[in-house]
């Protein structure tokens, strides 16, 4: 089998709060004098949850250990260090301002920590990262509009986009068009989860009501030929997270997952890990699985990394410099 360690990687879809391994959660809890319920952890450094909505709740429970700027810095640095050691050039971190507020940390303090973590990791490992602000669907439209307004008033070169996340079934994308409009008008690039927990109609709604150039997951687009054609025509890149989709039972196993079909139909696909310790995966593992279960060869893996960089929410000089590093 191909040794994917050598393959340069790039990740467009990673929830920063969802990147914390149980060991880090325990460590931060101890540092902050908190007790975390042990029943949310599995023995193998992953988390226990039952279904999508339960996963979102366990995610919130793990996040509450973040109490200050240093915690946000350490979480960010730990994730980027691991990625850099697996030859990852670039990561987009989906950071949730509303989760920071839930933890009692201000948006400013938490973001200072994230930015410090990015700068330290770049200094130590040469890895680039950017921040996407999460709009969390089930926290409501008003909160998302507030985040968009905050972002418009507080531009930062490392904050380059927004991503609508959370409960796709009960909170359809069209409800969030004002939040997207404010973000886009402020120069932020936009993507949204769609076609993960809901079907192709959710992807149609996302691409027709939000100013997006990418779709998070989007895998259920495979059920609709016209939609596949439209994704290709509009040059929309999919942030595919196969390990997450299987853990959340969007598909029963890799044999049923449409990654290979989407690629062969001509859709631009990329690989991401979503919330790695929740789904017992890593970005490196996703590249391995693309070889093992979807028969991707070296050139196809490199093509996915290039697809990520071509769709990345970065300035053109950074994109060009990163693309130049995609070689074995
Ligand atoms: N928030 C964190 N992970 C998510 C996922 N996979 N889908 C929707 N919202 C999320
Ligand atoms: Zn996600």
Image: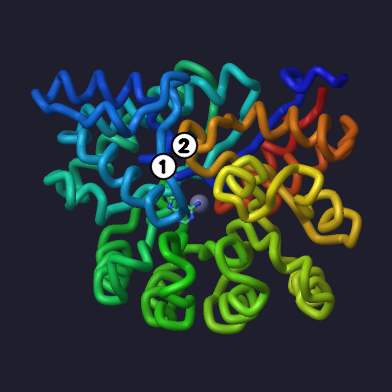
Q: Quadrant of residue 261?
A: bottom right
Percent of width and height locating residue 327: 81, 27
Percent of width and height locating residue 37: 22, 31
Q: Quadrant of residue 138?
A: bottom left
Percent of width and height locating residue 166: 41, 60
Residues tagged 2 and 1 counted as in contact (Cβ below 8 A):
yes
Residue at mark 1: 49
Whether residue 286 can be seen here: yes
Decide: few, some or many residues near mark 2? Use Cα within 10 Å; few <14, some 14-19, many ≥20: many
Residue at mark 2: 278
Q: Quadrant of the C terminus?
A: top right
- Residue 300 vs residue 102, the one in the foreground: 102
Is 234 located above or below residue 311 in the figure? Answer: below
The residue drawn where x is 90% and y is 33% is 297
Q: Give the secondary structure at mark 2.
A: helix
Q: Quadrant of the N terminus?
A: top right
Q: Is residue 70 left or right of residue 23?
A: left
In this picture the colour scheme is: rainbow
Marks 2 and 1 sit apart, C-alpha to C-alpha, by 8 Å
The residue drawn where x is 59% and y is 61% is 196
Q: Nearer the viewer, mark 2 or mark 1?
A: 1
Q: Is residue 175 left or right of residue 14?
A: left
The residue drawn where x is 48% and y is 27% is 80
Is 41 located above or below residue 18 in the figure? Answer: above
């Amino acid at each position: 089998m191909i040794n994917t360690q050598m393959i340069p990687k790039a990740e467009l879809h990673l929830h920063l709060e969802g990147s914390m391994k149980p060991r880090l959660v325990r460590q931060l809890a101890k540092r902050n004098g908190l007790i975390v319920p042990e029943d949310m952890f599995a023995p193998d450094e992953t988390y226990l949850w039952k279904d999508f909505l339960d996963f979102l709740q366990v995610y919130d429970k793990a996040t509450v250990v973040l109490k200050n700027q240093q915690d946000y810095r350490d979480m960010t640095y730990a994730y980027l260090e691991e990625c850099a050691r697996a030859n990852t050039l670039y990561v987009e971190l989906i950071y949730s301002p509303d989760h920071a507020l839930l933890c009692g940390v201000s948006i400013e303090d938490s973001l200072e920590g994230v930015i410090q973590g990015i700068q330290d990791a770049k200094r130590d490992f040469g890895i680039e990262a950017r921040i996407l602000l999460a709009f969390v669907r089930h926290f409501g439209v008003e909160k998302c509009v507030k985040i968009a307004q905050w972002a418009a008033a507080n531009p930062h070169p490392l904050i380059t986009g927004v991503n609508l996340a959370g409960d796709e079934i009960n909170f359809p994308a069209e409800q969030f068009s004002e939040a997207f409009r404010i973000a886009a008008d402020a120069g932020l690039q936009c993507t949204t989860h769609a076609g993960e927990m809901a079907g192709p109609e959710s992807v149609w709604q996302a691409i027709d009501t939000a100013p997006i150039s990418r779709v998070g997951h989007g895998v259920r687009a495979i059920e609709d030929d016209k939609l596949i054609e439209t994704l290709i025509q509009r040059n929309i890149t999919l942030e595919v997270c196969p390990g997450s989709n299987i853990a959340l039972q969007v598909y029963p196993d890799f044999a049923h997952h449409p990654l290979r079909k989407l690629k062969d139909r001509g859709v631009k696909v990329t690989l991401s890990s979503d919330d790695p310790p929740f789904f017992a995966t890593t970005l490196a593992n996703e590249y391995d699985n693309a070889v093992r279960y979807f028969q991707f060869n070296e050139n196809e893996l490199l093509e996915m990394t290039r697809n990520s960089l071509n769709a990345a929410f970065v300035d053109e000089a950074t994109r060009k410099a990163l693309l130049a590093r995609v070689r074995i």
